[in-house]
Amino acid sequence: MVDITFGPEPGKRPDLNNPTEAYIHQTRRKRLYGFILLILFVALMASGFKTAQDRNAGDFLSGLHQVGAFPAEVLSEAWTNRANLPALLWEHLPSLIETLNIAAAATLLGGAFGAFLALGSTRHLARFPALTPLFRRTADIMRAIPEIVIALILIFILGGGPVPAVLAIAFHTAGALGKLFSESAENADLKPVEGLASTGASWSQQIWLGILPQVAPNWLSYALLRFEINIRASAILGFVGSGGIGYDLKLAMQWGGGKYDEVVAIFALLFCAIVLFDQLSGYARNRLVKGQ
């Protein structure tokens, strides 16, 4: 007769040498830790909300019913002046193109430097293994600093315009792609590299012929995904004077009533551009990675 046990008897210590009891004990302990972490998270959120509420100029809950007031006013004015929307869309199209150019230039610069960081921080592939920790910490620092902080510093140094936005986004992109590229390169098959090394190929030839053909689809997929993110980032940086359609949106919202039809036109352009490039990059990534 088979003895089936579902855990220790109440008040009895589990026999950790018994696989069933050890598994049940481990599962219960994980659930207990998860429950404790959930309670701590809820407590921290509640205390954080109370602190923010105390520092607010007004009461959050009492003003909650007015959340839809501003969007309703914007849409109402835009509907009243809907005849102006086609002309406004055409007027702000150059700013949208500038935003896309900022995102594209930043992705190219960040991707190139990210590849350099990735090859320097990947185990078994680094040209100078002793410097691998330096490359990794550099990538960590670059992706830890938000784009807007870098942009504000560069605007103070260089003045307003698209150049600070390109450099700020490229700086953050290099750190993010450096990490992703490195993880992809670490999973590459090293047999082609060993074969090339046995024939006397240089390090650059080993990387170019043995590693890049394997990682190129994933690297291009990550770069396309980052391009989508950078379109949003370049629009946000326009609010701090970095040019593009974000700057036009900032000016339109500062004028307030009377310019809300312009706000809607800018939002429509930006939304359509993000959706379009999201679909195009998704299709391209599937073709690159899955061949579909």
Image (cartoon, rainbow, N blue to C red):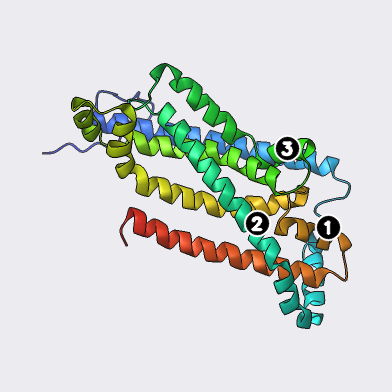
Q: Nearer the viewer, residue 57 or 166?
A: 166
Q: Nearer the viewer, mark 1 or mark 2?
A: 2
Badge 3: residue crowd in 10 Å (few <14, some 14–19, many ≥20): some
Element marked by disc 3: helix
For marks 1 and 3 on the same chain, the one whose residue lies earlier in the sequence: 1
Can you say whether 192 is above or below 265 in the image? above
The residue that appears at 61% across and 55% down in the rendered structure is: 101
Q: Nearer the viewer, residue 87 or 230?
A: 87
Can you give x and y, in whole percent of width and height, for residue 55 in the image? 84, 40
Q: Amino acid at mark 1?
A: Gly
Could you tell whether 150 is left or right of 71 in the image? left
Q: Amino acid at mark 2?
A: Thr
Q: CA distance from mark 1 to mark 2?
A: 35 Å
Marking on residue 274 = none
Marking on residue 63 = 1
Q: Quadrant of residue 132?
A: top left
For marks 3 and 2 on the same chain, the one whose residue lies earlier in the sequence: 2
The residue that appears at 41% across and 59% down in the rendered structure is: 284
Q: Amino acid at mark 3?
A: Leu
In the rendered image, the quadrant that contains the N terminus is top left
Q: CA distance from mark 1 to mark 3?
A: 37 Å
Q: Nearer the viewer, mark 1 or mark 3?
A: 3
Marking on residue 99 = 2
The answer, for residue 220, to whether it is visible in the render is yes
For marks 1 and 2 on the same chain, the one whose residue lies earlier in the sequence: 1
The residue that appears at 25% across and 23% down in the rendered structure is: 17
Give the residue at mark 3: 154
Badge 1: residue crowd in 10 Å (few <14, some 14–19, many ≥20): few
CB contact under 8 Å: marks 3 and 2: no
Question: Which residue is situated farthest in the bottom direction here?
Answer: 83
Q: Nearer the viewer, residue 27 or 121?
A: 121
